[in-house]
Image (cartoon, rainbow, N blue to C red):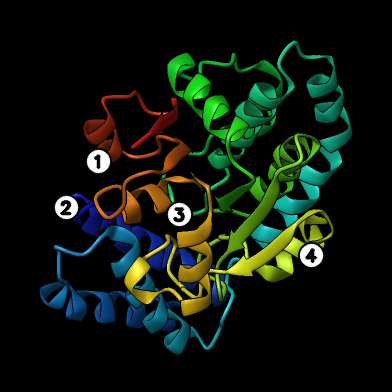
Amino acid sequence: MQTTLDCIPCFLRQALKAGRLACPNQEEVHKQIIYKFCELVPQLDLTLSPPALAGKIYGHISKITKQKDPFKEYKQDANKKALQMLPKLKQIIDQAPDKLKTALHISIIGNYIDAGIETNFNWEDALFKEKNTLDEQSFQLFIQKLQTSSSIMILGDNTGEIALDTLLVQELKSKRKQVIYVVREKPIINDATLEDAREVGMTKLCEVISSGVSSPGTVLENCSQQFIQYFKKADIILSKGQGNFEALIDKEDGIFFAFKVKCPVVVKLTGKKLGESVFFYK
């Protein structure tokens, strides 16, 4: 997916938000971020995906604020809240007629947890109230491919969401599938890193690797060789989150995409409404 003009004000809003979190009440720092962003705009290559450009922009923000992880408290809070909900959600899955489908539904709702978006979704209520609207044809294709596959790679996205993903991993492992879960190399917005994977217990459930990127999406040209090797060998790839969708949708076929639609640009691209769940195979 190429970056659109509508993405640029979104980048600016994210940059200012990160600056205010990293350096509260330091207006001069916030101004520096705005000035740097305005300086960068004419140089932005809009043929790149939004995650690819966001990674570059956040690199400048880190230098200005001297903070590597301005969203750290946000991330810790999201993980803590999601972990507290796991027992109740596990009970819902165990009582469901289709455990895997319910776990996937819950996993996608977790994608609401996104510090990079303008809309604040009530993901905690949605976990217990939102109906499962996953595309049945896509889900049945997912089941068919699972039956003839031994390994599945999950491209993780956000903190909080990664805690909910442990329920999905448990269901996949109960079907004797090898699961490889992928996180970001370094902190970027509220995306999950190896530290978060350890915090929520994902590393105890399955193999966790880094994609090698510090962008809010799996930008393949920047990924590590280790990741690319795993990526090519995986029988099934499940891409979680809007950032991974933006980075991969026009790069690779043979991927299941699972995420929440969280911006007008992706609304136009998918034909879905804001806040709708998306699950499909490309």
Q: Position of residue 220 (x, y in %)?
A: 36, 67
Q: Is residue 257 visible?
A: yes
Q: Please identify the quarter of the rendering in which residue 23 is found.
A: bottom right
At 70% from the left and 43% from the top, the residue drawn is 177
- Of labels 3 and 1, earlier in sequence is 3
For label 2, the residue is: 4
The one of 183 and 79 positioned closer to us in this rendering = 183
- Disc ID at residue 116: 3
Q: Position of residue 63 (x, y in %)?
A: 44, 89
Q: Are marks 2 and 1 in contact (CB under 8 Å)?
A: yes
Crowding near the residue tagged with mark 1, few <14, some 14–19, many ≥20 C-alpha atoms within 10 Å: some
Task: Tell me the residue that label 4 is attached to.
Answer: 198
Give coordinates of residue 262: x percent, y percent: 40, 38
Asked if 245 appears above or below 75 in the picture, the reply is: above
Q: How many angstroms separate mark 4 from mark 1 (CA)?
A: 34 Å
At 37% from the left edge and 75% from the top edge, which residue is drawn? 222
Residue at label 1? Answer: 265
> Is label 4 in contact with label 1 (beta carbons under 8 Å)?
no
**Mark 4: few/some/many CA within 10 Å (<14, 14-19, 20+):** few
Q: Amino acid at mark 1?
A: Val
Quarter of the image holding residue 46?
bottom left
Which of marks 3 and 4 precedes in the sequence? 3
Q: Residue at x 58, y 44 (%)?
A: 113
The type of residue carrying mark 3 is Gly
